[in-house]
Image: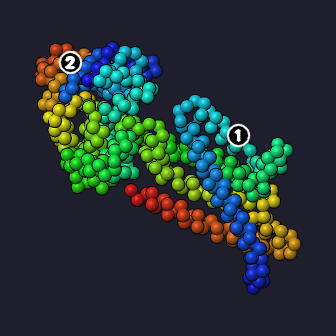
Amino acid sequence: MQKFLHDANEFLPILLQGVWLTILVTLGSLILSTILGLLWALMRVSGVWALSGLSAGLINLIRGIPIIVLLFYLYFVMPDFGITLTALQAAILGLGIAYSAYQAENFRAGIEAIDKGQIEAAQTIGMGWALTMRRVVLPQAVRIVLPPYGNIMIMLLKDSSQASTITVAELALQGKLIASSTFKNTSVFTLVALMYLTMSIPLILLVRHLEKRAGRR
Amino acid sequence: MIELRDVHKKFGAVEVLKGITAAVEKSEVVCIIGPSGSGKSTILRCINGLESYDSGDILVEGARVDSKAKSIVAIRTQVSMVFQRFNLFPHRTALENVVEGPIYVKNEPRAEAFERGRALLARVGLAEKADAYPAQLSGGQQQRVAIARALAMQPKAILFDEPTSALDPELVGDVLSVMRKLADDGMTMVVVTHEMGFAGDVADRVLFIDGGVIVEQGPAKSVLNQPQHARTQDFLRRVLHPL
């Protein structure tokens, strides 16, 4: 135990640098995937044949490609087409796109769970599609969507470690580098695991708080 | 002000409206009665474009109702609807439900809309429930909020789709008395209902619909008290004397 604390004291500053990048990748791709996911979901329920077809196709395409392959594609293949991204940009973009598919399906489930009578009531007071979504459907869908959204946030936090495969020196990669140069595998990876766990706790609490707030009515 | 000319409507292979021709004048209260599945609600839903119809014409103040055209929004703001299951927005208070249309569809100034909203809630007897959420209200109260929400659009007519069918019997009276007051104030109303007492007392005219056609129509008293058609007689007997 004492040895572990000594190691922790020594490695923590380096690992914390990784934590910063982990947070950056997670937050960046969370925002991107939420925006894209909402866009796919709205296209899917738009009732416009071309849009919903395109959205369904995109979601299946994205879901069918492993995240790691998507990341390799963005970081190693895109330069051949003249698009060069930094490792961090590629990581956020790749994870954001990959997770947008899951977000979209979650959002769609929430939207479709809203009673048709709500939409009819909105229509009878003269609301168009966009206004109905903004004022009536989405505010109610949020409550349904939140618990799985929390799940997605935590999965995304953990999957941000895949950014290590394209040289983003986030927490997992920092840990691996320290471990391979010091051979203190036990200490290092225990620390890394504890740090991921620590980061997921605020996310769990945040979702719980939001659920409570949404459920008050 | 509302006119239906030979309206036909199919759901898949089933023809639910087989040529409905009727007119509702300004300030008139028309009750539509008939067995379930006869197409009563479908008529209302076609009038404000919640359903499309296959042939014929529906005119509201001379404008043809087309559920897919842009003009439907203008028609819907003139013809409000009250639903069997209230369909209040559960995430908004009673008052917010009422002002939603005026503020977001008609772009009325907020202060003005809220003031008018409070007055409307008072008119349906719910002034003190302005800040309650729908889940905190009884069915009868929810339906009265829904009526206030419909009134807030300052419609020329209101369509009621079985407004008391989902209510506990002791709450029906509150809703009917609000509707009676509206009728007295000269509101044009089309009411699908099973409340024969209301139809007899308040309606100017009654349409009896069965199997997608108007079987019989006329002044409320004569249709309800001296029905001419055998099907009307049979229906009224079952409704008035269920045992």
Element under disc 1: helix
**Which residue is disc 1 drawn over?**
A61
Q: Which chain carries label 1?
A: A
Please identify the quarter of the rendering in which residue B152 is found.
Answer: top left
- Position of the C terminus of chain B by quadrant: top left
Quadrant of the drawing holding the N terminus of chain B:
top left
x and y percentages locating residue B206 in the rendered image: 20, 23
Residue B50 position (above or below residue B15):
below
Locate residue A131: give its quadrant: top left
Residue type beneath disc 2: Gln
Under mark 1, the amino acid is Leu
Q: Mark 2 points at which residue?
A: B217
Question: Do we see residue A25 in this rendering?
Answer: yes
Residue A93 screen position, x and y as percent:
71, 51
Where residue A11 appears, as percent x and y from the top left, is 77, 77
| Residue A139 image point, x, y percent | 46, 50
Query: Measuring 77% from the left and 83% from the top, which residue is drawn there?
Result: A6
Of residues B145 and A116, the one nearer the viewer is B145
